[in-house]
Image (spheres, helix red, strand yellow):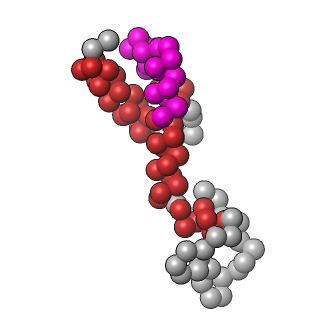
């Protein structure tokens, strides 16, 4: 597989992952199906799928790091709880 062909497949799979990540269906499933249709299979495909999923997880952590660390009791900078807010509030991510 040529480098240009690999880049094109990676770009297509990245777009599929990005568009389907926050849908209530499996973005990984979409990526696997599209990869199969493009002939992108084997160890390289599995490694790519793992790396792109780690990228998605990292993006969520970067966007919500204050809330995530606040949920486990680690606070950076200003406190997450404002005066007068309930401590028993359940926060969903």
What residue lies at 27% left-to-right and 14% top-to-bottom? 2
Q: Is residue 22 above or below residue 2?
A: below
- Whole-percent x and y of residue 88? 75, 74
What residue lies at 52% left-to-right and 60% top-to-bottom? 64
Is residue 93 shown to the viewer in this render? Answer: yes
Q: Is residue 93 above or below residue 17?
A: below
What residue lies at 68% left-to-right and 70% top-to-bottom? 73
Q: In the image shown, does 93 or 69 lie closer to the viewer?
A: 69
Q: Is residue 2 above or below residue 25?
A: above
The quarter in which the N terminus is drawn is top left
Range covered by the magenta-colored residues: 32-51
- Whole-percent x and y of residue 49? 49, 28
The quarter in which the C terminus is drawn is bottom right
- Whole-percent x and y of residue 80? 59, 76
What residue lies at 60% left-to-right and 61% top-to-bottom? 68
Is residue 33 shown to the viewer in this render? Answer: no
The number of numbered badges drawn on the structure is 0
Q: In the image shown, does 25 or 17 lie closer to the viewer?
A: 17
- Whole-percent x and y of residue 40? 42, 15
Please say whether residue 79 is one of the residues in the magenta stretch: no
């Amino acid at each position: 597989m040529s480098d240009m062909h690999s880049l094109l497949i990676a770009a297509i799979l990245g777009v599929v992952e990005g568009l389907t990540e926050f849908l209530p269906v499996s973005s990984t499933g979409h990526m696997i199906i599209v990869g199969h249709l493009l002939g992108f299979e084997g160890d390289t495909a599995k490694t790519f799928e793992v790396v792109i999923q780690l990228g998605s997880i990292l993006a969520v952590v970067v966007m919500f790091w204050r809330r995530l660390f606040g949920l486990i009791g680690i606070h950076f900078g200003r406190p997450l709880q404002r005066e007068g807010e309930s401590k028993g509030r359940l926060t969903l991510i």
